Amino acid sequence: MASFPKVKSVALRTISTPLILSAVLVVLALVTVAYGSRPFNQTMIDIFVRVILVTGLYIFVGNSGVLSFGHIGFTCMGAYAAAWLTMPPMMKELSFPGLPDWLKALQLPYGPGAVLAGIFAGVFALIFGRILMRLSGIAASIATFAMLAMINTIYANWESVTSATNSVVGIPIVRTIWPYLIGAIAAVFIAWAHAISRHGLALRAARDEPTAALASGIDIPRVRLVAFTLSGAVVGLGGALMAHSIGVVTPDTFYLGLTFITLSMLVVGGIGTLTGAVMGVVLLSLLIQGLRWLERGVPVGESTFALPGGLQEILLGVVMIVILARRPSGLFAREFVWPARLGAGRRNSSAATRNVPAGDA
């Protein structure tokens, strides 16, 4: 019984990371609802969508150490699957004449549609992963980029099913912030659950000591495949919610630009921690929004101060270089956890009130 408080303390410190991160996201949502304008509400929706995407990236990249350039391809799949499942049948007849009749007649609410879109992306992540997860290092990274290029090419040319490069309109737009908050929190807890699972522990062991992991009997391609499939499903969910946040999708939306901004947020925040994945999105998104605000112009007395056009990207690049030069492991190399002394302090306080020595308590 003497070890029970220690076991309980370890469990509390493990669950504290997603709880703290979820609390941060909830506070952002409440502040937005209470004080934010409609444009700021959309900005916060974009942040929550990016949290889903970057957290999905972390599930694979952060735990495996293999840099993936292809996950935004699954985001594209999720976005178009959401369009197929939730658009009105008449709009689908015009935009996607090549869809099966049963799918053109189907119209689901955005919630079930987003979940099914995530599962759809996860299935294809499983199919691609069966081949790609046998590769390692730079070969695996290049292969994921080839996968992204292949997905983009298919969606940009399959006119009867994806409307090719034309903008797909008519996707139901969801303006309220709560579904995106729920999706972001769900992604955080999925990432945490995978990280503490047997597969997550084995994957990190293979990342840190691949030779020792093989000698211990860890099937490295298999544990990588589990993470790749799960992360594909999560970013697919993010793609579906992204489609509902803007109401329009094109293949180019889910290509190089989104790939590099999400990878940048993960690397700057801290590629090896869930905290880094979430807080990297929040901090860089707020920085980007602040630079956009300065580009539009800020009244200063009787004049207006505005950054020159295009300077936003330059300043953002400089900030990222400075951060990585000073902190190569990212801003958050360690997870957010409850203070280590919290549990001990409570036990000591309880023992003192009963006049019982803390060691006997």
Image (cartoon, rainbow, N blue to C red):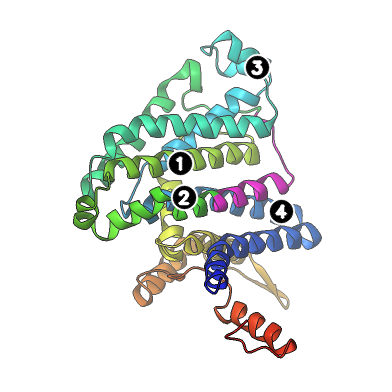
Q: Main secondary structure of the magenta part?
A: helix
**What's the residue type where badge 4 is placed?**
Asn
Give the mark, 4 or 1, whose residue is nearer the N terminus: 4
Q: Label 2, label 4: how many angstroms apart (C-alpha)? A: 31 Å
118 lies left or right of 28 = left
What residue is at 49 percent from the left and 18 percent from the top? 161
Nearer to me, 267 or 209: 209
Q: Which residue is mark 1?
A: 230
Counting residues from the start of the chain, the first of labels 2 and 4 encountered is 4
Measuring from the top left, give residue 361's x and y in whole percent.
63, 81
Q: Find disc 3 in the rendering and name its residue.
A: 106
Q: Decide: marks 1, 2 in contact (CB < 8 A)?
A: yes
Q: Is residue 133 magenta-colored? A: no
Question: Of the residues tagged 1 and 2, which is closer to the observer?
Answer: 2
Residue 265, labelled with which disc?
none
Magenta stretch bounds: 171-189
Instruction: Name the residue that disc number 2 marks.
Output: 194
Closer to viewer: mark 2 or mark 4: 2
Q: Residues within 10 Å of mark 4 (few under 14, many from 20)?
A: some
Mark 3–mark 1 CB contact (< 8 Å) = no
